[in-house]
Each structure stands twice: as structure tokens, then as C-alpha cells.
Image: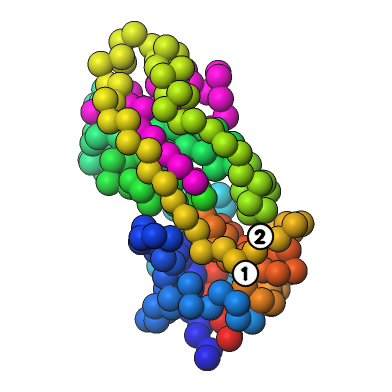
Amino acid sequence: MRYSGPLAKMKTNLQDEVKYYLEIGDDFIMMNDLIGKDLKMTYLNQITCFCGDLVSEVFRMNFCRKCFFEKPEAGDAILRPELSKAHLGEEDRDLEWEKKYQLQPHLVYLANSAGLKVGVTRIGQRPTRWIDQGAREAIVLAETENRFEAGQIEVALKAHMSDKTPWQRMVKGEDVEIDLLTEKKQAVQYVPDEYAKFISENDEVTHIEYPVTEYPTKAKSVNLEKNGSVEGKLVGIRGQYLLFSSGAVMNVRSHEGRHVLLEF
Ligand SMILES: [Zn+2]
């Protein structure tokens, strides 16, 4: 089979184990069915930005130059929620867009993705965000009314734990046992008093299983723009990473917009 078109982040569905769907052009490919099979993905040397423009290079978060510097989707508060200003009525790039995005309920969560981390996401992104990070478990620490408040809580917690996923360990399945409920009780004391009212009483721990038949013992990150292609037996998928038996691991999300040819 041959499919070609621009890549998008894999869509996911949390069942007994995560189901992954890759959209290439007009086609939807059920990636779980490809585990155990040989596949090849080749870069076709062009990139479609989310604005629709065809470009040859992109900036951080896969935005073209114009989008990166101008669009609200690439504003400071996207990667750094604590910089949100819409609650003050202050514009960064497009106040109406920023109000819609920032002034909605957000979660501050603790997750175990080969280590404890804290993160922020919009409430509707649960559990998608956790799956995209390859978390094995997650718990809600706080539910805030807007992005700024969640960002402030996250900043306070970052003094005590990481806000990054150690992806090299995660893709090798180097998981650690963490009691998230105990961690939550501990973390509550680091929440600034003015935000204590947002601490969530929901202590449910979400467990996530990934379709992985064997974890690679070494992991080498694939960059299609540099490597040109990746080829081999797919042994699993975790987070947004395709795991190959050779130890090659490819982060689909970081390749968003790249035009590829997928063959299997
Ligand atoms: Zn663009």
C-alpha cells in the first residue's frame, strides 16, 4: 500500500490500549494494524503550514515564518501558559482569539511518563494530551477557570518537579513506579494560597496502555528532513512516537506538515 500527503499528529482513542490513526491526505490509516510489519516513510521535501502555505522550512511548532511571528496560535502563552494576558483584556496578537483560547477551564495535572511531570492543558484535551506525552498514568491536580491561573500553579510546581517528558526513557519503556495520589497530596502544599480553591477533589488516576510489542533498547530519533526516510519493522507506538525494531524512533507530531510517502 502507498499513501502520500502531509503528516498530522496521530489521532488517538483511549481503549484497553490506545488506538492510533494516521491521517495522510484523504486517507486514515489504523496504525495499530501495522505493528509487526515493515514500513517505509520517505520525505517528499515540502511542508504545508497550518495556514495552508507550502513552504520549504518551518519554525518551532511547525509554523511558517509568517505564522510564527504573527498568528495567535504561535503566541507566547501557547508554550508558556503563565504568560497569558487575555484575562486582563490585554492583547498579545489577537485578543478575540486569545480570549477564546485562554478564558476556558484548564487542568493542571501530574503525569508519569517515565518520570513525574507537571503540565497544563485545556479541559477538553484530557486524555489526549496525556496520551501524546506517552504518560502511563495521570491525575488532575487542579481545575482552573483560565489558562493564566493554571500557568501560575504550574510555575510554582516546576520548582519541585519537571515539566518535561524524558522522551529517551519513555520510548525505551524505562518506566518508574510512581504513586500519583501520594504525589498529588505532596504537590497540593506547593500550590500558592490564592489558587488553593482550584485544587481538584477528583483523585481518579487514569491508566494508559500503549500498543508496544517490544521496546527498543537504544533509541535514535529520526528527523526526516535530515535522514530522508525511515524504514523497518514497527514494534510499537507510544506518545506520538513510532518505535522501530532498529531503535529508530520517529515523533510524528514534530513532523507535522511534512509531505511523506508511506509504504507498507
Ligand atoms: Zn503559515
Q: Quadrant of the C terminus?
A: bottom right
Relative to 217, 135 lies left or right: left
Residue 252 shows up from this direction: no
Q: Residue at x 42, y 46 (%)?
A: 207
Q: Looking at the image, is 48 positioned above or below residue 141? A: below
Residue found at the far bottom of this picture: 1
Residue underneath mark 1: 235
Residue 142 shows up from this direction: yes
Q: Earlier in the sequence, mark 2 or mark 1?
A: 2
**Crowding at mark 2 (Cα within 10 Å: few <14, some 14-19, many 20+):** many
Residue type, numbered disc 2: Tyr
Residue 156 covered by magenta stretch: yes
Which percent across, then down, holds residue 187? Answer: 45, 19
Residue type, numbered disc 1: Val
Which percent across, then down, holds residue 46? Answer: 57, 73
Q: Residue at x 23, y 41 (%)?
A: 100
Residue 215 covered by magenta stretch: no
Magenta-highlighted residues: 135-163
Q: Is disc 2 in contact with disc 1, using a CB cutoff of under 8 Å?
A: yes
Task: Identify the secondary structure beneath mark 2.
Answer: loop
Tag on residue 215?
2
Q: Looking at the image, is 96 positioned above or below residue 160? A: below
